[in-house]
Image: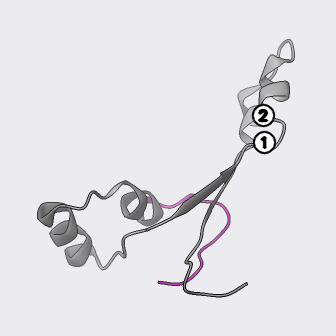
């Protein structure tokens, strides 16, 4: 597995993240050619402060969320 995009926005990333450690999920991943994601790092920047603002828009709040996928076998 390699380090992936810092923004999770594809169905394949979501499936790799949500897959459980059970045979049926692994079979589904194999059939679709998707690798399971072992480790997810989330950084919510000033999310709490942003959503506390009056009249904050969903788009503004979403911009404060960053989800990255990290492979511990690949050094920085």
The residue at the point 78 percent across, 23 percent down is: 51
Q: Neighbour class for label 2 at 10 Å: few (<14), some, many (≥20)?
A: some
Query: Magenta part of the protein: which range?
Result: 1-11
Q: Residues within 10 Å of mark 1 (few under 14, many from 20)?
A: some
- Residue at 87 percent across and 17 percent down: it is 53
Q: Is 41 left or right of 36, judged from the image as shown?
A: right
Spatial CA span between label 2 and label 1:
5 Å
Left or right of residue 58, residue 49 in this image: right
Which residue is under mark 2? 47
Residue 12, percent from left and from top: 41, 66
Sooner in the amino-acid sequence: mark 2 or mark 1: 2
- Picture residue at 74% right of the left edge, 43% below the top: 44
Q: Quick one: SS at disc 1?
A: loop
Q: Is residue 43 left or right of residue 23?
A: right
Q: Quadrant of the C terminus?
A: bottom right
Q: Position of residue 20 (x, y in %)?
A: 27, 57
Q: Which mark is residue 12?
A: none
Residue sitting farthest toward the top: 54
Image: 72 above or below 16? below
| Residue 60 among magenta residues | no
Residue of label 1: 64
Q: Are the residues tagged 2 and 1 within 8 Å (C-beta)?
A: yes
Q: Is residue 54 above or below residue 1?
A: above
């Amino acid at each position: 597995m390699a380090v992936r995009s810092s923004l999770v926005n594809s169905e394949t990333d979501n499936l790799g993240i949500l897959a459980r450690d059970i045979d049926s999920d692994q079979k589904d991943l194999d059939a679709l050619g998707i690798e399971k994601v072992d480790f997810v790092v989330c950084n919510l920047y000033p999310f709490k402060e942003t959503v506390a603002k009056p009249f904050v828009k969903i788009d503004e709040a979403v911009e404060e969320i960053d989800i990255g996928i990290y492979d511990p076998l690949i050094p920085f």
